[in-house]
Image (cartoon, rainbow, N blue to C red):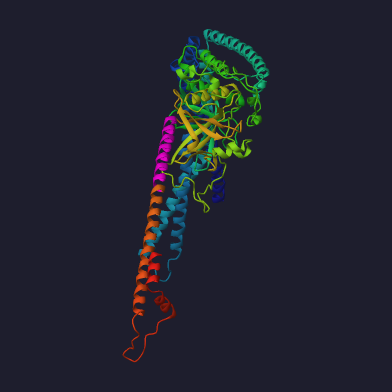
Amino acid sequence: QTRSLLGVFEEDAAAISNYINQLFQAMHRIYDAQNELSAATHLTSKLLKEYEKQRFPLGGDDEVMTSTLQQFAKVIDEAISSCHAVLSTQLADAMMFPITQFKERDLKEILTLKEVFQIASNDHDAAITRYSRLSKRRENEKIKAEVTEDVYTSRKKQHQTMMHYFCALNTLQYKKKIAMLEPLLGYMQAQISFFKMGSENLTDQLEEFLTNIGTSVQNVRREMECEVENMQQTIEDLEVASDPLYLPDPDPTKFPVHRNLTRKAGYLNARNKTGLVSSSWERQFYFTQGGNLMSQARGDVAGGLVMDIDNCSVMAVDCEDRRYCFQITSFDGKKSSILQAESKKDYEEWICTINNISKQIYLSENPEEIAARVNQSALEAVTPSPSFQQRHESMRPAVQSRAPAARTSSTGSLGSESAALSALSLDSLVAPDTPIQFDIISPVSEDLPGQAKSSGQSGRRTNPFGESGGLKSETEDSILHQLFIVRFLGSMEVKSDESPDVVYETMRQILAARAIHNIFRMTESHLLVTCDCLKLIDPQTQVTRLQFPLPNVVLYATHQENKRLFGFVLRTAGGRVESRQTSICYIFESNNEGEKICDSVGLAKQIAFHAELDRKASEKQKELDRVKEKQQKELNKQKQIEKDLEEQSRLIAASSRPNQSSGEGQFVVLSSSQSEDSDLGEDGKKKRESE
């Protein structure tokens, strides 16, 4: 019965321990939360005090806001944070300490006594078992005394332990009530004390301050609502006005192209090579700054230099089947960039702006006014002809009535005009109403077959893999091989090929015509200079676009100021009038290598001239060698004849002797031919010698 009753008390003690642990965790959460609230309130007060030290990018010197926050920090620190700190201390002393003591001291004491009682009970059972095993027949007083002492000790220990354990279990019922009520009483008293301190700190002055702050907040809210309403109206107006701009390529009639700009900014796609044949496009913000082209990636603080565009060249290019692409090449030709605009308007404005900057117009006081004046002078520098509007008719030969003063109004020049050019009439240099060819067209499609054949132009495709297919290259034996990167500007027929002024005037006419008709595209090619010809080769497919025989190149010159421009005059058979030779001037732009190309052409002509002299001297020497060889053959033939005659004379002399028998009784028998020769005698011999 005792052990059964003990089991009930032990079960009750285990339930009390479980419940007290849960209550302890709940009260500990209250204590932790109060500590966190106290620390957070103190941190809030500290941050409000540090507001005046902050430097906001858009914040001005708002002294009212600073003083208000300082007042809030003072109230929070003195009235609220201090109260929370006191509440945390009271909760620790009055709530957490009693329940912690009961949990750590009383409940652990019950567990310890339970273990000790179990050990004493086991020892008593073992002692009784040994005592029961004592032998009745062989009694040993010593062993009996030891066992008896052991039973006494274990029974006494068990009894004492049992009494202490039972006492602790009975006392636990009272301690349970105390351990549950004391923490709750301390928690309620701490909260009441906290609210009393808050009520004492809430003065009339603080209420007035809070009322003023509430009124200010309402005023700020009303201002914000008015500002939001105004911004919404502005957004609606902008959406209506900007609707045409949402198109990637807006209508050019509504948004005309500005060609007089010296500054430009906007997004462009830049081509970056990632391998031998692969490339990637990256969208970046580009802008001009003086004579520099800058770019700025998203997230960068400032822009970086792309290239110096003073004296640069810009042209439209075809790149990877993309629209609105153009290429910028630096003045020395060492750096180039391919960019893509979003619309045709941006595309033309970028090209015009870079052209204006390359002429260093931006250095003047009124750059846009000067750019407009330069573009206007370019418009007045050339008289447009029907061939500009109808390019497909520009290649057809036509004999039209030409007014002698058709070009007398062309007084402007894009380059510096020489004194000789001002003295000559333009009609004596350039044929009036001459069509201008802006692109390279294969001679197969021309209507001038005689011109194409005589000029040596060839559209023959060369093997791009370098295999000749059994045919020897025309320039394989040439001493000079120089390759230049050029861009074809245009060509036109000229009336004279005796003065470099012809090339200068053709440059002016072609550049002015390109400016009038907004022709920015230029075909890039490789110019191969050899001792036999000049070749224009497609850099991609290695197709020979045009071929100019070097003897037909009668004149070549570089622009007097812009050394990137150069041209040459090609004399051909046939043309607009089939009965006479015609001269065509071809104009190109290079990467600042105009003088080098002209020097290379001059060197090629000198080499060709000396090669021709050497060839003629070689042919003459070969002719002399052939004459000497012929004379030597005749002399050898004469010597052979004389040798044959001597042999025949010896035979005749031998046949004229009397027939003698040999030592063996044989006779010498002459042939019929020898007998006939002997019949002729001396007369025959003389006749043969004469022959």
Task: Give the left or right position of residue 383, taking residue 104 as reference.
Answer: right
From this view, report whether residue 506 is shown above or below residue 644.
above
**Magenta stretch encompasses residue 154:** no
Residue found at the very far bottom of the displayed protein: 665
From this view, report whether residue 146 is shown above or below residue 490.
below
Magenta highlight: main SS:
helix
User: In this orientation, does residue 418 appear?
Assistant: no
Work out whether residue 286 or residue 657 is closer to the camera in this orientation and state it.
657
Quarter containing the C terminus: bottom left
From this view, report whether residue 30 is shown above or below residue 204.
below
User: In this orientation, does residue 146 appear?
Assistant: yes
When asked about the image quadrant of residue 581, the answer is top right
Task: Give the left or right position of residue 677, taking residue 574 as reference.
Answer: left
Work out whether residue 591 or residue 91 is closer to the camera in this orientation and state it.
591
Question: Residue 260, percent across and down?
Answer: 55, 17
Question: Residue 571, percent across and down?
Answer: 52, 33
- Count the marks: 0
**Residue at x 45%, y 59% (from the top left corner):** 126
From this view, report whether residue 29 is shown above or below residue 666.
above
Q: Which residues are magenta?
A: 592-618
When asked about the image quadrant of residue 510, the answer is top right
Work out whether residue 476 or residue 252 is closer to the camera in this orientation and state it.
476
Question: Residue 425, percent across and down?
Answer: 53, 18
Work out whether residue 476 or residue 42 is closer to the camera in this orientation and state it.
476
Question: Residue 670, percent across and down?
Answer: 40, 82
Residue found at the very far left of the displayed protein: 663
Task: Give the left or right position of residue 444, taking residue 634 as reference.
Answer: right
